[in-house]
Image (tube, grey):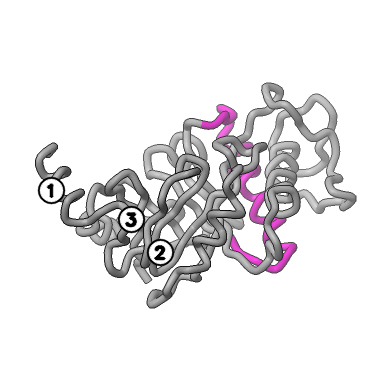
Amino acid sequence: MVIAAVLLLVAVPAEAATPGSGNDVSWPQCGKTLPKGQTFAIVGVNNGLANTTNPCLAAELTWARTSKGGTAQPLVALYANTANPGAAGSWWPTSNTYGGTAVSNPYGQCTSGSVDAACSYMYGYAKAYDDANSRGVSNPGSYTWWLDVETGNSWSTDQTANRADLEGMVAYFASIGTSAGLYSTAAQWNQIVGTVPSSSSLYTLGSWLPGASSLALAKRKCSNAPLTGGGKVTLTQYVSGGFDYDTSCV
């Protein structure tokens, strides 16, 4: 396996994108020479946590705009870290209002001291609002936003609350006229969110599946089950030469 990896690095330098592939980048790639010739790009707006900003966002967006196209994916999309920290967070909502807007909350009224689904929904809404308005993204409604759902961030043990959190993010992005998708492994998704009912706004969202070690394996993942029963796998990810590469399944 080590020898194969070395040969791959020789054959496909990190600065050259695999033909037909896209790339996703964020704060870990700050200061690195980014791949060239990517068909599409997805840029992370956070610095690893849902309440932080990628310090290289502007430079990485400039790079992303050099994407050459040729797939059904948008030339440039964004992704956001997600979390549902409850009382452990540096900030937690106390009402159904954020950013000067009274938010229609399907889980009821968020009240001070509560970490239930209603306040989780508002937390997700607030993080999406911040991502769109406080990270340095111009015209955030012009991008597709992927929600990065991983166990490395803080989550409630209540899967309904976690689902509400993500639904709040989707609701904010819908309010500015754009759409979202879901990035996670099946195992992490099942731990954090579990089965999503058809009544949820998450149910029909596209899935972006990581975990492959080659383009061939990434293409095979296109036939995997989506994260939600009403969605479909639209992207898969593989790693090569220290960079994340992505293949379109649509």
The spot of residue 85 in percent (x, y) is 64, 29
Residue 66 drawn at (x, y percent): 48, 68
Q: Is residue 61 left or right of residue 170?
A: left
Front position among marks 2 and 3: 3
In this picture, is 170 found above or below 115?
below
Q: CA distance from mark 3 to mark 1?
A: 15 Å
Residue labelled with disc 2: 234
Identify the residue position indicated by label 1 in the image.
7
Q: Main secondary structure of the magenta part?
A: helix
Q: Residue at x 50, y 62 (%)?
A: 64
Amino acid under label 2?
Thr
Sequence-first tag of 1 and 2: 1
x and y percentages locating residue 185 in the rendered image: 38, 44
Q: Which residues are magenta?
A: 153-180
Distance of label 1 from label 2 (alpha carbons): 29 Å
Q: Position of residue 125 (x, y in %)?
A: 72, 47
Q: Mark 3 belongs to which amino acid?
A: Glu
Q: Earlier in the sequence, mark 2 or mark 3?
A: 3
Q: Residue at x 68, y 28 (%)?
A: 86
- Name the element at disc 2: strand
Residue found 61% across the figure and 43% down from its top: 55
Q: Residue at x 56, y 54 (%)?
A: 59
- Circles 3 and 1: CB distance less than 8 Å? no
